[in-house]
Image (tube, grey):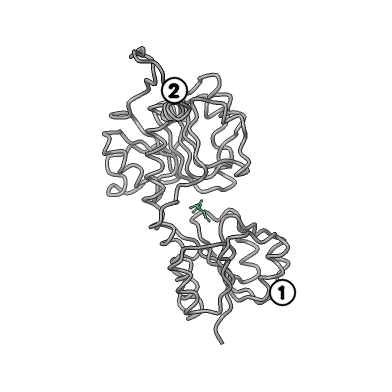
Amino acid sequence: MKPKILVSRKISDGAEEILKQEFDVTLNLNDKPYPYEELIKLVNNYDGLISTSFDKLDKNFFESLTGRLKVIGHVGVGYDNINTQSAKEKNIKVSNTPNVLNDAVAEITILLILASSRRIGEAYNLVKTNTWKDHRPDITKLMVGNEITGKTLGIIGMGRIGQIVADRARAFNMKIIYFNRNKLSKDLEKDAAYYSDLKSMLPNCDYVSLHTPATPETKNIINPETLKLFPKHSVFINTSRGSTVDDDALIEALKNKKIYGAGLDVFNNEPNLDKRYLELDNCFVLPHVGSATHETRLAMSMLAVNNLKCFFSNKPLLSEVV
Ligand code: 8YV
């Protein structure tokens, strides 16, 4: 008998096809989220689950399981929605989707750097709302922003995504500095300067881009104390997780022009982000689309499926979390 797999949301077509061939699969073709309690009840009839970031797989979820579920292939590199300790206690394997989304997230990071420096949100709104009327604008003012060429980019978290962001930024002649738990080897670091202390790096940044996972250590790493160290002309970029930011502090800094701007793809409590962000001209916002390309979403879906294939053929998982 083929293992039974539940897929909590719609995933890429190509990956669904493989699931149909290999497993006894229940897809979610109309992408209707299962309510929390319903998912718990349902998943007890399955050997494997393909999850997304929108599923809350917390302690109670794992404690409510009756023993059949053995593996979770999570579609996402971040897995802060999964209580991995509880999974481990229940002897359930969990995999994520690292690497395959690096380029897509790096692209969005560069987009946010450019958009927040060149006032693209304001400029786009001016045209879209049909309020671009001035034939002879003040050329020193109208949508005049900052150039990124030659500026210094400070990267918080120089992992796989941080390193690709650095490479892309080098194409703009940006100087790279970084804060990380460990100094990278010379070949990975290239010309980037290492700071073992975040507070020493921040005053030297024109741009600060955050690429850490959501952990207790990174919660509110952007807070009143760290924001005080950002130069007044600097821009903050976040494509990792909203929990790294103390919203009150960032909004206060943006509102009172203590920093130049921010470009944010991720928020606390998505999609119900703090609405004060929407009132700020110097904050460019996106609805968590870092990995949203056809290529990457297919690669993420395929990696989750291939992890399940490995599990059920007694091979090591390709990207095991626990
Ligand atoms: C996805 C992400 O939107 O990979 C992650 O951690 O945040 C995004 O790529 C999400 O995980 C989809 O489940």
Between disc 1 and disc 2, whose residue precedes? 1
Asked if disc 1 and disc 2 are in contact, CB closer than 8 Å, the reply is no
Secondary structure at badge 1 equals loop
Q: Is residue 272 above or below residue 301?
A: above
- Say whether residue 200 is visible: no
Q: Is residue 40 above or below residue 220?
A: below
Figure disc tally: 2
Q: Quadrant of residue 237?
A: top left
Foreground of the two, 232 or 6:
6
Q: Is residue 227 left or right of residue 86?
A: left
Foreground of the two, 309 or 284:
284
Residue at label 1? 66
Determine the CA span between mark 1 and mark 2.
54 Å
Q: Position of residue 271 (x, y in %)?
A: 60, 44
Q: Mark 1 packing: few (<14 Cα in 10 Å), some, or many (20+)?
A: few
Residue at label 2? 231
> Would the CB of label 2 be found within 8 Å of ligand 1?
no
Q: Position of residue 232 (x, y in %)?
A: 45, 20
* The C terminus sits in image quarter: bottom right
Residue 197's disc is: none
